[in-house]
Every structure is written in structure tokens, then in C-alpha cells.
Amino acid sequence: MPPPVISVEGLGKRYTLSHQKRQDTLRDSLTQGVRALFTGIRGGARDDKEDFWALRDVSFEINQGDVVGIIGRNGAGKSTLLKILSRITEPTTGRAVIRGRVASLLEVGTGFHPELSGRENIFLNGAILGMSREEIARKFDEIVAFAEVERFLDTQVKHYSSGMYVRLAFAVAAHLEPEILIVDEVLAVGDIAFQKKCLGKIRSVSSQEGRTVLIVSHNLSQIATLADRGILLDKGRLVTDGEISQVTQEYFGRNQSATSEFVAQTSPDRPHLHRVKIITSEPGNIQAYGKALTLEFELHHPEPVPEAFFSFQTLNANAQPVAHLWLGSTTQPFAFQPGTTLLRCEIPFVRMNVGLYNLRAFFSGPPGSPFFEVTEPPLAFEVVRLDPPTVFGWRSEACAYYEEAAWQIRNPSAP
């Protein structure tokens, strides 16, 4: 059994945060300056400092040919981990052993020299990866064709758009034959057609060429499509390491509210959404496909609202709106008297595909006026299928809805 290409043992990264007291007035600034003068002479007070662990006690191994998705909320430590594996930053504790050449795309333009042309940067990046000039030249035409930057090949890359940066950077990283390819979010900058091309290339370098890929993306459908294994980070610690579907479900579960009701913590003296309650067909915020889903909204408005509009969106697990329902229109708004208004919305037959969903609510006055409130209450529900599975059994990222339709089939050539 060959040794793992990546071995991480007890990895930790600590940053020191400084907190300075804010001076709101000129008098505060002058007073603080005088104090600093005297305390500095006496070697006295300094800014408050705090240790922040971006990673703590993280351990795992990755074998050759694995495609691993790194999953977690913002601030979970994903990018810090990839920077350590890319040798951009040093760990505070533990160690990471890398066996093989690493090509990283951690942000737009990583590894590019802005004063050099695209052509020169291709050779520079290849040299950084330890390739000879002959090896780079052999791949050069393939890189240029993939990146689609022929016209700008001899232009300094500081004049490139972010999309051109990404196309060239990915083409270089994927074609110069690194043993390990690390990609962090940057594909979100490219257009849809190029993203598809990149995803196809990632699949080929892993399945056909046996290279190892680590990928971070907030588009979990991309990760679920590409990766066979996932690592879930939360607040700098490794929570789950396993099969990708298991890890994504763990991620959704940790971010799903345990309650089916949201109540605002404050009661401002203005129109606002005070309460949201979701009534699913099954216990535990579980909504069966094909059954009714009911939503209740409580609006507070201490003053009359002569023209009111209310709507809400349903967002999927990738924060993409998949449905929008509203009450009131530009031709038929409704009015609120001072006090509280209760709204109840029933969706009699839920056709949303399986997966986790959240809500975003909009409460406003007449068109063109500012919103009273746009809110995303921490309230989620999960759609499951309790009926027999469909023929295709599409995953949640494959489609948003299953719609009913009437079909007609004709075969004029039939005898």
C-alpha cells in the first residue's frame, strides 16, 4: 500500500488579534495620544490582544487519486488549511507532510507576476512546479487553447479581467501535471461555460490521470458531483471525514434550526416581521413531497400602512432561490391598520425536490419605497420523498421541482 500523498497530524494555526478602543471624537483621540505617550515611556499599556485558532488539532490522510471536498461555513478554517497544504503559511502546531508537486488556485492570480505577460507567467508557474522548459513548452499550446486567451498572451496579466486570470491560472495548474491540485472557490469567478470545462478537467485529472484533488466551494452541488469524500470543518476543528453524501448531510444538519418557529428578539417601533412558523407535514421540520406545507407570518406595524406588500422566497441548500410567493401586487396592494397582522400561506402540494430549504421574507410599502424588512430567519425544513422513488431519482442539485404535466405521444410512422 503506497503512503498517503497528504498526511496531516495535529494541525493548528493561531493568529493574534489586536483590539483597539475606538475614539469617536477629537477629544478622545487627543486623550488617548497623551496616555500612549506616558504609558509608552513607562513601558505600560498596550492594545488588548486575543488568540484566535483558525485550525486546531486537525488530522487526516489523503491517498493518491482521491477527490476531497472541504466543507464548512465561513470562518471554519477551510482556506487556512489549504494555505498550509500549499506551503503559503506555516502551522502553529502539528505538521502536514506533502508527497508530490502541488498546484494551488487559492485566489484570483495566485502565483502570477502582474508585470509579466501571460506567456511568461505560464513558464514561471511551470518552473515553480519544478518542470523543465521543455516540459512546459510541450504543454504550452494545450494550456493556451484551454484558457482561451490567445489574443492577450503577450499582454501583462495586470491588465487581465478576473475571468481571464482564472481561465489562465486554472489552465496552468491543471495542465502542468502536478500530483496534487488544490482549488479554493476561484471557479466562481468564471462564466458558466468555463466552469463546466473546469469541472470536466478536474474529473479527468482524477479519474483518468490518478491525481489528487482538494476543492473548496460554497456550491455544494459541485462538490457532491466531483468529490467521493468530504471533510467537514467547524470553528477550526475537523467534525466529519467520510463519504461525501454523509458529510454534506452532517453539514446541513448542523446548520438546520432545531425549532420550527422564529421570533424576533426585539420589537422596533417600525413595521417588521415579528414571527415565522413553519408547519410541515411530518414531525421534526420534515416535509413530505406531495403533501401540504403551511407557513404563518406575524407582522407588527405600529402605524397604518396604506399600501402593503409581503412575499417570501424558498432557497435551496446552495442559497439559490427556487420559488417566490407573494401577497399583493402593483395593481392590488393591501392595507394594514395599526397593530398586528397574521398571514397564513398554504402550499397544498409540495413538488420541490428532496433537500434542505430556508426562507427569505420581504415586507414593504408601495413600489419604490424602502423595504420595511428583508429577513432570513434561522428556519429550515427538509423535503423528503415518502412515496416510491421516481424512475430517475434525481439528486437535489439536478432539478428544483418535479412538475405535473399532460403529455401526448404520436408516432406517425407507426403501421
Image (tube, helix red, strand yellow):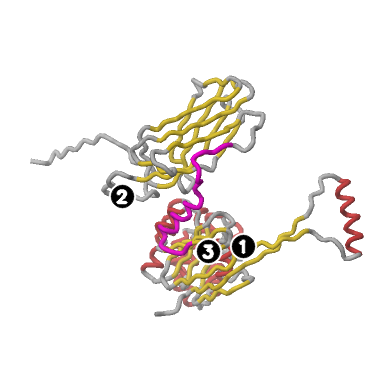
Quarter location, residue 194: bottom left
Tell me the distance, in whole angstroms, between the alpha carbons under discs 3 and 1.
12 Å
Q: How crowded is mark 3: few (under 14 residues within 10 Å), some or many (20 or more)?
A: some
38 left or right of 147 in image? right
Image quadrant containing the N terminus: bottom left
- The image's mark for residue 238 is 3
Foreground pick, 303 / 146? 303
Q: What stretch is highlighted in magenta?
A: 240-263
Q: Give the foreground label among 3 and 1.
A: 3
Q: Name the residue under label 1.
A: 54
Q: In x, y percent, where is residue 148?
A: 47, 58
Amino acid on which the number 1 mark rests in the picture: Ala
Tell me the distance, in whole angstroms, between the alpha carbons under discs 2 and 3.
31 Å
Amino acid on which the number 2 mark rests in the picture: Gly
Foreground pick, 290 / 262? 262
Q: In x, y percent, where is residue 211?
A: 42, 71
Q: Which residue is drawn at 46% across and 73% down?
A: 179
Q: Earlier in the sequence, mark 3 or mark 1?
A: 1
Amino acid on which the number 3 mark rests in the picture: Leu
Q: How crowded is mark 2: few (under 14 residues within 10 Å), some or many (20 or more)?
A: few
Q: Name the residue under label 2.
A: 393
Image quadrant containing the C terminus: top left
Q: Give the foreground label among 2 and 3.
A: 3
Q: In x, y percent, where is residue 353?
A: 37, 44
78 left or right of 66 in image? right
Q: What element carries label 3?
A: strand
Q: Earlier in the sequence, mark 2 or mark 3?
A: 3
Q: Can residue 151 be seen in this view?
A: no
